Image: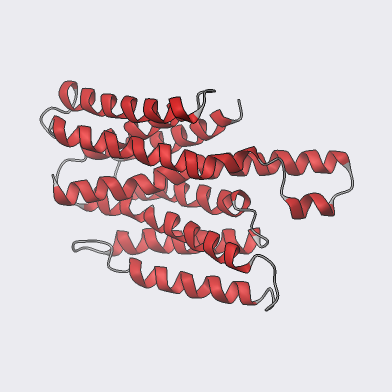
Amino acid sequence: MIRWIRVAVALVLVLALSTSVYWGYSVFLLATGLIVLGVAYGWPRLTDSPQPRATSIMLALFGMAGLFAAWQDESAPYLDWLPVLAGLGLLWTFVQNLTRGIGASYAVANVSAQVSGLVIVLSASTWVAAITVPGDKEAIIIGLIALITAQCMTALPWPAIYTSPLALAMSTAVAGILSVLVFDDSITWPTALILGIIMGLLVAAVDRMLGLIAYAKFQAANLEASQNIEVKKNVEKARSFAVQLALGAAPIALGGVVVYALERIAL
């Protein structure tokens, strides 16, 4: 049942993005900010970071900076500042981990997890770039619907050997149907099928690579510090929600890269 929390999170984000496409550029920017905040809060809990608050602050700041940079960039490719932000984020990560001391445990794993989170929050800015690209925005809607469809399939209580192909098949089918029946004048069905296939693969990959972490019962450091059983239960519940929040928001953030690339290449 807890796996459906990520679907609820993804659904909220998809609805916010898809409706704000028609409400205005500024509203879409605010909706994209929800993705950044979701990943920023959930990612350090998902990866069991020894510095969850500092990591959340870092991810939120750089994610928002990426959105602002894409919003202010008026010429293609609309992502000129992204490499600079990625470099500064990497530097921040090293400095933050040096503050733990030279002999800190799991330093390499912690740096790797923080850099991965940085890549994901910066990927959210591609949604802003995608809506800035001239032309129809139906690819954004189709991509978002394909994402939430695949998320629903991976949340089914079946082994991944069934849910992953199902996510791929359903996201592809939904994208194709939408292109033929709803957006036939804006996007061709072969392009929509490619979009659906990539979105399905993306969600299935995130579910397989990160989803197993959701079954961990607690954050080890917090549990060792707690002696009270009720405190332990609260820690487990808080981490479970944060994990599902990250798992719901991460594919949405990464999906912007797919839509943006498709708009630049095929549309």
- Residue extending furthest toward the right: 227
Instruction: Name the residue located 17 percent from the left edge and 52 percent from the top edge.
Output: 264
Quadrant containing the C terminus is top left
Q: Position of residue 39 (x, y in %)?
A: 51, 50
What's the image's color scheme? secondary structure
Instruction: Name the residue located 60 percent from the left edge and 72 percent from the top edge.
Output: 96
Quadrant containing the N terminus is top right
- Relative vertical location of residue 98 with respect to residue 124 in this rendering, above or below: below
Would residue 38 appear left or right of 102 to someone viewing this image? left
Considering depth in this image, is 30 or 48 the residue closer to the camera?
48
Residue 183 in sight here: yes
Residue 152 in sight here: no
Instruction: Name the residue located 50 percent from the left edge and 36 percent from the top edge.
Output: 9
- Relative vertical location of residue 60 with respect to residue 185 in this rendering, above or below: below
Q: Position of residue 171 (x, y in %)?
A: 32, 29
Name the image quarter holding residue 102.
bottom right
Considering depth in this image, is 18 or 100 the residue closer to the camera?
100
Q: Position of residue 112 (x, y in %)?
A: 53, 63
- Residue extending furthest toward the left: 185
- Count every numbered label the image shows and give the total: 0
Name the image quarter holding residue 163.
top left
Considering depth in this image, is 245 or 225 the residue closer to the camera?
225
Q: Position of residue 79 (x, y in %)?
A: 28, 63
Would residue 107 appear left or right of 92 to someone viewing this image? right
Instruction: Name the residue located 61 percent from the left edge and 72 percent from the top edge.
Output: 97
Would residue 26 appear left or right of 163 to someone viewing this image? left
